[in-house]
Amino acid sequence: MSHPHNDGVNADGVNAFTAAQLSRIAQHGIYTSPTSLDPAAAHVAEALVATLDGTAEQPVLPPDLQKLTEQVRQKAIIGFPRITAEDGVRLSAHTIKLKGDEPRPVVIVPSGWTPFGWALFEYTYLQLAIRGYHVLAYTPRGIGLTMRVPGKGYVDGPFTSEGTIDVAGPHDWTDGSTVIDYAEQHFEPSRIAFLGESYGSGISQLVAAHDEKGRVDAVVALSTWGDLAASLYQHETRHLAAVTALINFTGGPVERKFDEETQRILTDFQAGRNLDTVVKWGKRRAPSSYADKTNARAVPTFFSNTWHETLFPANQVIEHFNALTVPKHLNLWIGDHAAPEGAGLTIPFSGPNQPVEEAFAWLDHHVLGIDNAVPTWSAVSSQIMFTYETRTDPQTGNIEIVTPAARESSRSWEDVTTSTERWYLTATASDDRDGGLGTAPETGWQREFTAGQPTEAIAADAVITSGQAEWNGNPKAYVTEKFDRQNLAVWTSDPIPTDGRGGAARRIRGICELTLTVRNTAPSTTLVAYLFDLGPDSMARIITHEPLTLTDLTPDRDHRATWKLQAAGYDLPQDHRLMLVVTSKDPLYSDASVDGSTTRISSPDGSAAFLTLPLG
């Protein structure tokens, strides 16, 4: 059994952690950029590990965390093993084995895609131990910090696993079963659950589907995917920013972290070639490809995702969720990847972190056997964007702010949408500058813009962090006057009065769909559709969006296009407007737009352009 600090981390170097740092993480989240964690999040994990294993020579934690580690040390045996996979690769792991003869379940936690491996969520393992679980956390193969040492090659960090990253492939499935073998040998658990966040959540689902002995009794999948192929490449559009962020967050150089085959897949993806092979590779790593196995094993599965997810967009998770017949639950939250649960898995809060507490409740019921409220939960819970409150500022007058959002429960995803309505794209809006959105079809008009140029209409300023700010009450505000109409097209409704149900103008619930006619002077183009909530001050917030790439166009010939935008749960405030924007580029995605070409959106006779709005 190896000790993590024997691998090059000096316990004397562990910094004391402060309440101010905890507060910062709680208020702003654990990410400072798409590829950087707040150093304080790493420090608290390191301090917890050092205190837990007794190598901290002086107190490095606030009193409440110090007490928590002492409680766990009193009731459990702490370990830091290396688990040997079938092919000899050694996985960095961490165990908390509860003392006593009473049979206890084990929660196995494969780490996320992070240079810090399993250590980042040490606080979660302590919480699970206090609740009555054995814990076995491990870093999937290849994940973790790897440093180049001049003249000496590479040195792995203390929480790094050997091997190369299999991206939730067959090696990871087999490794998961090997970890279960280890757990059975050392814990003799009464039941076995997997809990994962991000990368670990996909691995958790796939191990549950593939373990030959069917030993996984429940899964918690936070910020997860259902279809990896669709997460990377959908509507003929590559999600380049997400993949670039992942590659840059492995903790080491590409040639060290990935084998030649995976490097070739990633290179092909980035170059836009051999995409059929890339899709096949992604489908093999998609839990949705094995829904029949999960259903046959009846594995209770808990999902948690976000509306504005930039790594694993909501629609593909929803589709996977719908295909499962097992006991299941889906939470959809405001924000982006890891924002709802990231801080709650890392540090304590002054009150409960609801996304994490509900995940624990799922385990408590299905694994620990506690009679709690889980059986009464509806299948789907949606946090609604956003709750507005108007307050009077004595100096500036009325101001509109975002306040904590309401949640709604539904018996199924199909029940989230109770009706739909069509908003037709029209020639002009009331301001005579943009096109309009109305309730009656209108044909015979066209709007043109120059393709290939970036605009101020974008889905997010950055992967992960824009949505993290949104989760923390600061959604991106768009200055629509900066939308350059030379490079995009806009359609805006009139102000919409209340629908008579709680003050909202429209209760948008579900998946919007856009149908229009397009032509371009080039043989290919990309259309990125955005639906905004436009306020009286011409400021907007994004409701949903989705790109579509067309590569088989005949120049200057009409092409009818229909595509689904990402799911949304959004209350449009009274007297706000709907704004639909179509551009040709977004920094999140690849595009096939030819710079300087002309895109024409039209509504020819017999083929009205319209937006289908789902309501609930």
Image (cartoon, grey):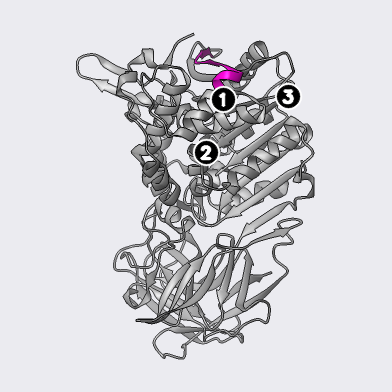
Residue drawn at x 55%, y 44% as measured from the top left: 223
Three-letter code for the amino acid on which mark 3 is drawn: Arg
Q: What is the CA distance from the residue labelled 3 to the residue labelled 1?
A: 24 Å
Give the residue furthest to the left. 151
Q: Is mark 1 on a helix, strand or loop?
A: helix
Residue named by callout 3: 191
Q: Quadrant of residue 498?
A: bottom right
Residue named by callout 1: 71
Which mark sits nearer the N-terminus, 3 or 1?
A: 1
Three-letter code for the amino acid on which mark 2 is drawn: Leu
* Image vertical order of residue 496 relative to residue 49, above or below: below
Report x, y in % for residue 40: 36, 38
Residue drawn at x 48%, y 23% as measured from the top left: 141
| Residue 215 seen by the camera | yes
Q: In this view, does 6 lie to the left or right of 547?
A: left
Report x, y in % for residue 319: 66, 50
Q: Is mark 3 on a helix, strand or loop?
A: loop
Residue named by callout 2: 345
Kindly indicate whether the residue at mark 2 contacts the one at mark 1 (C-beta within 8 angstroms).
no
Tell which tag, 3 or 2, sits nearer the viewer. 2
Q: What stretch is highlighted in magenta?
A: 71-84
Q: Is mark 2 on a helix, strand or loop?
A: helix
Three-letter code for the amino acid on which mark 1 is drawn: Gln
Q: Characterize the local packing of mark 3: few (<14), some (14-19) or many (20 or more) Cα atoms within 10 angstroms.
A: many
Q: Characterize the local packing of mark 2: few (<14), some (14-19) or many (20 or more) Cα atoms within 10 angstroms.
A: many
